[in-house]
Image: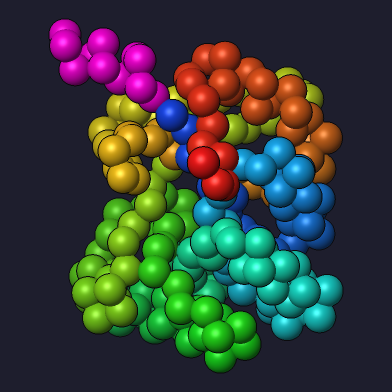
Amino acid sequence: MFKKQLNLIFVLLLLTVDDIPNKWSEALFKKILENNYDCIFFITANKDSIYNPEYKNLIKNIIRNGYIIGNHSFSHSTNNWNNNFLLAFIDFQKMHKIIEKEFGYKMQYLRIPYGIKENTGIKLFKKFYKYKSIKWTIAVKMHFNRFECQNTVECNYEPIRINDNKYYVVLFHPTKSIVENFDKIVECLEKKYGKIKRLYE
Ligand SMILES: [Zn+2]
């Protein structure tokens, strides 16, 4: 009972964006930057979009503004990971090395595509490269231009701890409708769940 009350009073939200870069990533990043929200951006290289010069600048810009980039695997394809756990290791390693080489940036956080379970390869990768997982608590989905907060607390994902605060983690995807409805979405999220973490506070 006491724990529940605590959660109600102190719940804070940390924004995260999966599947960058794509063509809506820059517009979404601008919205986040303008509002001074903190955010972790999870990067993947499916479709080789990471090699597009325009996207390279976006990634540089995200890093330069003090944001964290996280590893969302190179391929974003988890099909064979459970048959051969080394494939998962290699997939995250590949992404890690590209970002280190291209941007001189060492990623420390990962998010597994499609929310699948951590297998042996991912556990090994995390240990070897000293990574932490950031799972999400609330997924923002658009439905006929109305947004829904899909609460996934039933997955038992614990809020993450940063300094003395506990944060529920909000998952966004860079899409046209999310960008167009961003202001409404964050207003509604703050009303329903609590204050969004700002970048510097
Ligand atoms: Zn994804």
Q: Residue at x 61, y 83 (%)?
A: 103
**Quadrant of the rendered structure where residue 182 is?**
top right
What segment is highlighted magenta in the picture? Answer: 1-11
Position of the N terminus, as image quadrant, is: top left
Q: Residue 132's x, y, as percent? A: 31, 61
Q: Is residue 79 visible?
A: no
Q: Is residue 127 visible?
A: yes
Query: Which of the pair 167/97 is nearer the observer?
Result: 167
Asked if the stretch drawn in magenta spans residue 7, the answer is yes
Q: Residue 54's x, y, as percent? A: 83, 74
Image height of 20 relative to 169, above or below: below
Image height of 184 relative to 4, above or below: below
Q: Residue at x 39, y 69 (%)?
A: 108
- The majority secondary structure of the magenta stretch comes to helix
Q: Residue 39's x, y, as percent? A: 56, 49
Q: Residue at x 48, y 68 (%)?
A: 71
Query: Which of the pair 129/22 is nearer the observer?
Result: 129
Image height of 25 relative to 201, above or below: below
> Given the current orientation, which residue lies at the most extreme bottom position?
101
Q: Residue at x 62, y 68 (%)?
A: 63
**Quadrant of the rendered structure where residue 175 is?**
top right
Query: Which of the pair 111/90 is nearer the observer?
Result: 111
